[in-house]
Image (tube, rainbow, N blue to C red):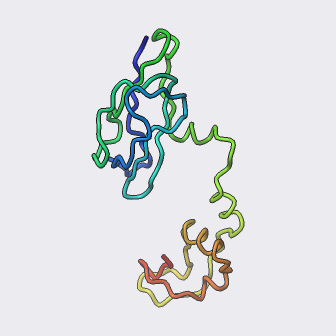
Amino acid sequence: MSVVELVMPKLGESIMEATILKWLKKPGDKVEQDETILEIATDKVDSEVPSTADGIISEILFEENDVVPVGETIARIKTEGNDTENAGPPKTQEQISSHRNEPYEEASLIEEVPYQPSEKKSSAPGNTGVRFYSPLVLNIASGEGISLSELENIEGTGQDGRVS
């Protein structure tokens, strides 16, 4: 029997830590690979952390509401078999997400409202005359039925007059 360490995943380049919101499994619970074990939150995103192996949760090292650095071991999973069967690095969050059968809904929303810079000049200082819309703004506009021409008429309150 071997032990696999479940580590706090890296969810973004600037994310250095995450808060454990809720444990969905407890020590002694059987888990399958890619089964959600806990929910975490960062300053940018909430996410679920899946198991990296089949086995039994042997130890939980942090409690709910604990702030844990990225890369830190958060739990241990006892697996059947020897160490050579489990050789290889654990899957990253991106690899796990790419294997799921369901495509992300956001991806289709971005395609529905493609980025098209506007030549409309804003009175904001330092503005080059081209309006930038983040993917999040485009997704929200698409979801609310706001066309790109309507979006261009909205006065931005963000940095450099951006719509936020």
Question: 123 or 163: nearer the eye?
Answer: 163
Image x and y of residue 116, in percent: 66, 73
> In the drawing, does residue 102 fall left or right of residue 53?
right
Q: How many numbered circles does the render carry?
A: 0
Which residue appears at 33% of the width and 27% of the height? 59
Which residue appears at 64% of the width and 85% of the height? 150
Question: 145 or 37: nearer the eye?
Answer: 37
Q: In the figure, 118 relative to 105: above or below?
A: below
Task: Give the position of the N terminus as an image quadrant.
Answer: top left
Q: In the figure, 97 relative to 107: above or below?
A: above
Image x and y of residue 98, in percent: 62, 41
Dividing the picture into quadrants, the one containing residue 109 is bottom right
Q: In the figure, 4 relative to 164: above or below?
A: above
Question: 155 or 57: nearer the eye?
Answer: 57
> In the drawing, does residue 120 fall left or right of residue 52?
right
Q: In the figure, 120 relative to 108: above or below?
A: below
Dividing the picture into quadrants, the one containing residue 105 is bottom right
Which residue appears at 54% of the width and 41% of the height? 94
Which residue appears at 53% of the width and 35% of the height? 35
Image x and y of residue 3, in percent: 40, 18
Image x and y of residue 131, in percent: 56, 78
Q: Residue furthest right?
A: 112
